[in-house]
Structures are given as structure tokens and as C-alpha cells.
Image (cartoon, helix red, strand yellow):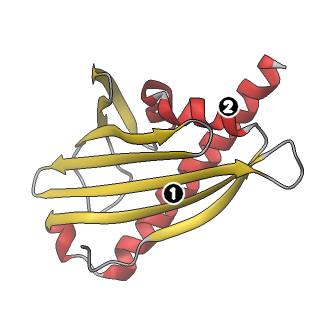
């Protein structure tokens, strides 16, 4: 269990739960929206390895991140674990995303929670405020990119 409170929120995406689910479980596509992505490679059916160049002053090295699809229920739920390591730092995050039709009938309500499961090295010495601020920035950028990508795919498929 982490000493950090989980991050959570709700996003409304203009696409069906089916399309949102398809995007989330396609890890090769999903990692393309990760801020600072340098490269990615699928290593097995459920894992994509990436190299990320974070834009934070307190992490000056590339991070190796493994994105693993842990669990999913079609059109309803997706759980992804991210394990990251770099020089002098390592952490893991479990992200759970619950999907449901939005009340407008044409969009998806995505309720999400991200929990820091482990944090070691230099990043563990940072204060909660710095970690929360950095995570909030990455989360916002990621959801903005997800929204843009899913909505563009949705228009192309209509």
C-alpha cells in the first residue's frame, strides 16, 4: 500500500464504451499518447515496453516503463499496471478504468483511479505535493491526448 492517496477522476469521451475499451486494451496504440514517449515495443500479448523522457526537472533520465494489461471486461473495465525504472528511481502504478454509457447516450463516462503501488530511489524522497503536481500534469496531458485520438478515430469510423 502506498503512502500517497490514489489519484482519481471522471472523463467524458465522445465515443461508445466499446470504442473506448478497444483503445484502452490496444496497448500499442495507448502508449502513443504517453507524454514524452521515445519508443515502444510489444513484448507479449499483454505487455508493451516503452522508453519515456519525462519533462520534469527532478527526473533527468529516460525511464523504462512496462505497460501490462492486467484485467479487462469488454466495454466495462480495464486495469493496467505500469512499472517504471530509471537511474536511481523506480515506481509502479495500478490504473483502474470503469466505463459506462454517459447520460447523453452517445458518449462514455470513464471513472478512473491510479494508485502508486511502489516507489523507491530518488523519486521516493520527493514530497507528496511535488509528486501530485507532476502526476496531475501527466494525467491531464494523457487524457487530453486520449480524448483527441479517440474522438478522431470515432469520426473516421462513422
Residue at image mark 1: 139
Q: From the viewer's perspective, is 135 left or right of 99? A: left
Residue 10 figure quarter: bottom right
Residue at image mark 2: 19
User: Which residue is more in the foreground, 58 or 12?
Assistant: 12
Residue 152 visible (yes or no): yes
Residue 92, position as x, y percentages in the image: 25, 56
Cα gap from disc 2 to disc 1, whole angstroms: 20 Å
The disc label shown at residue 94, or none? none
Number of numbered discs on residues? 2
Residue 148, position as x, y percentages in the image: 69, 38
Image quadrant containing the N terminus: bottom left
Q: Residue at x 39, y 78 (%)?
A: 5
Q: Residue furthest top?
A: 157
Residue 50 figure quarter: top left
Q: Residue at x 53, y 52 (%)?
A: 97
- Compare marks 2 and 1 and give the one earlier in the sequence: 2
Q: From the viewer's perspective, is 68 left or right of 32? A: left
In the rendered structure, are the residues bearing label 2 and label 1 in contact, judged by CB atoms less than 8 Å apart?
no
Q: Residue at x 43, y 61 (%)?
A: 114
Residue 156, position as x, y percentages in the image: 78, 18
**Label 2, residues with CA under 10 Å away: few <14, some 14-19, many ≥20:** some
Image quadrant containing the C terminus: top right
| Up/down of 66 relative to 133, above or below | above
Residue 149 visible (yes or no): no
Residue 68, position as x, y percentages in the image: 32, 38
**Label 1, residues with CA under 10 Å away: few <14, some 14-19, many ≥20:** some
User: Which residue is more in the foreground, 150 or 133?
Assistant: 150
Q: From the viewer's perspective, is 3 left or right of 25? A: left
Q: Secondary structure at mark 2?
A: helix
Amino acid at each position: 500500500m502506498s503512502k500517497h492517496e490514489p489519484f482519481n477522476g471522471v472523463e467524458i469521451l465522445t465515443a461508445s464504451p466499446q470504442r473506448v475499451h478497444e483503445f484502452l486494451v490496444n496497448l500499442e496504440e495507448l502508449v502513443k499518447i504517453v507524454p514524452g514517449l521515445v519508443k515502444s515495443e510489444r513484448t507479449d500479448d499483454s505487455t508493451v515496453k516503452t522508453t519515456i523522457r519525462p519533462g520534469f526537472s527532478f527526473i533527468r533520465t529516460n525511464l523504462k516503463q512496462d505497460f501490462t494489461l492486467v484485467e479487462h471486461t469488454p466495454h466495462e473495465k480495464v486495469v493496467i499496471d505500469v512499472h517504471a525504472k530509471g537511474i536511481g528511481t523506480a515506481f509502479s502504478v495500478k490504473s483502474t478504468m470503469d466505463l459506462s454509457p454517459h447520460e447523453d447516450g452517445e458518449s462514455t463516462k470513464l471513472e478512473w483511479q491510479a494508485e502508486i503501488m511502489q516507489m523507491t530511489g530518488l523519486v521516493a524522497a520527493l514530497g507528496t505535493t511535488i509528486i501530485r503536481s507532476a502526476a496531475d500534469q501527466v494525467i491531464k496531458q494523457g487524457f487530453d491526448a486520449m480524448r483527441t485520438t479517440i474522438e478522431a478515430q470515432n469520426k473516421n469510423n462513422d
